[in-house]
Amino acid sequence: MPIKTIIEPFRIKSVEPIRWTTREQRMELLRQAHYNLFLLPADDVLIDLLTDSGTGAMSTHQWAAVMEGDESYAGSRSFERFRRSIQNVFGYKHVIPTHQGRAAERILFGVTCKKGDVVPNNTHFDTTRANVEFTGAEAVDLLVPEGRQPALAHPFKGNMDVAGLEKLIGRVGRERIPLVMLTVTNNSGGGQPVSMENARRVSEVCRRSGIPLYFDAARFAENAWFIKVREKGYESKTPKEIAGEMFALGDGCTMSAKKDGLANIGGFLCTNNDLLAQQEKDLLILTEGYPTYGGLAGRDLEAIAVGIQEALEEDYLRYRISSIAYLGNHIASQGVPIVQPPGGHAIYLDARAFLPHLPQEQFPGVALAAELYLEGGVRSVEIGSLMFGPAAQMELVRLAIPRRVYTQSHIDYLVEVILEVWKNRERIRGLRLTYQAPFLRHFTARLEPID
Ligand code: F0G
């Protein structure tokens, strides 16, 4: 019999205790946090799946590299290592460091977009959309229809609707589209990958129309792994070769190194366009810093330089994707509705199907996230009506798995907690808003249970 047990492809050298609370304490903590898990002190969370962003564990190689950090203001050795490592994987001519992904977005869209422009994406992440809209441009999501059906299993639900893209270009004219973006993997759509074939077709449309193609590369390594195991012709290619092939289809990228950079902070912006790179660097100096550090310490640049390479290691990717699939498949086999198939960085519970007795205006996703905390001290995040308002297409609860942080026994614990909540789902009550901010309200909203 082949051995099936999933084990971590690493040993643990440094540990961080996590803290138990009682159900009564959690009941009170939830009340104090106004049923919004963003407002909980992290110390009161046992397993924190709020995000996979900046929450990963660094390797011994990364920590060693941190000590090599060159903190020179200009022309540091660390920047050279950072640039070389990124070019080695991404292949773009200019590499501009930023303090995180959204800073890269702000600079890219700030330089390329203006009022009246339109930016297509398979699905904009919320900061990406906000940064496009901040310039006065319109952010348009062009996801394939399969991507909007949570229960449907399809290997590449992150794909862009290519016919829709051609139609959009025909309708608004290519001069109003400064760039097209592909988000790999598609975070807002369930962590679903984009196929190489789809990226190639999008790239062809872009080239034909003279529109640059950019990647939102936050989870590029996980996307490459899915291509390796799901797309014909890629079985024997390495994740690094696959990533390189995909990036060669575009003209640049934005990157949050807090995901597949395996770092706790950082990001970058890449482009092949000399003129654009100059404008971007000028803007960078204004808000982020000199172009050889861009708001990061030399040690951060070092951690990213190593992390980018480690994120592409096959043992790591195989383990990570199997462990997340294990979580998804175990709960789904007991009837729990999840976005199928399990994604690259997270499991998304379909709160609408989980709690059919709660109407959209009672925030089923927020109610489910609160219940998971109450049951097991698990923090997740709603991606639904609280985040997007009444326009939300789905009511999802994301359980994002930090990289190299939790072990398989934590995953087994999660399975138990979710199944317990599933068993008692009919008792879960809806919530109503008592406070909301004018934008990005999910971070600070306050709610209360409806009797
Ligand atoms: N693009 C995608 C696809 C993302 O998921 C994120 C962040 C960003 C861009 C922005 O990067 O946080 O470094 O500024 N996603 C985090 C999340 C916050 O929880 O999914 P950032």
Image (cartoon, helix red, strand yellow):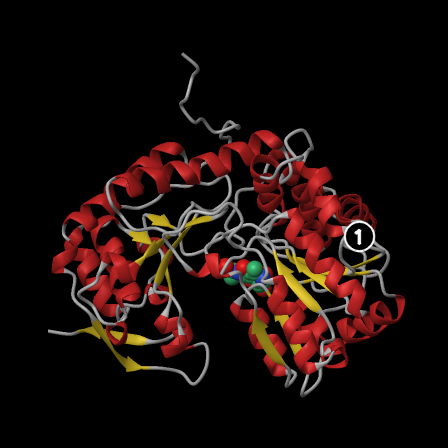
Residue found at the very far top of the displayed protein: 1
Identify the image quadrant of residue 279.
bottom right
Q: In which quarter of the image is the N terminus?
A: top left
* Side of 30 where 131 appears, left or right: right
Expressed as whole percent of the image width and height from the top left, the position of residue 384 reads 37, 68
Which residue has dot 1 on it? 79
Expressed as whole percent of the image width and height from the top left, the position of residue 301 reads 71, 51
* Side of 226 where 444 appears, left or right: left
Expressed as whole percent of the image width and height from the top left, the position of residue 155 reads 51, 45
In this rendered view, identify the residue nearer to me: 243 or 410.
243
In this rendered view, identify the residue nearer to me: 260 or 393.
393
The residue at 19%/69% (across/down) is 430
Expressed as whole percent of the image width and height from the top left, the position of residue 393 reads 40, 69
* Side of 441 where 297 appears, left or right: right
SS class, disc 1: helix
Please determine whether, in this image, residue 357 is positioned above or below residue 341: below
Q: Which amino acid does label 1 sit on?
A: Phe
Where's ligand 1: which quadrant? bottom right
Please determine whether, in this image, residue 300 is positioned above or below residue 439: above
Q: Can residue 115 be seen in this view?
A: yes
Please determine whether, in this image, residue 84 is positioned above or below residue 60: below
Q: Is residue 269 visible?
A: no
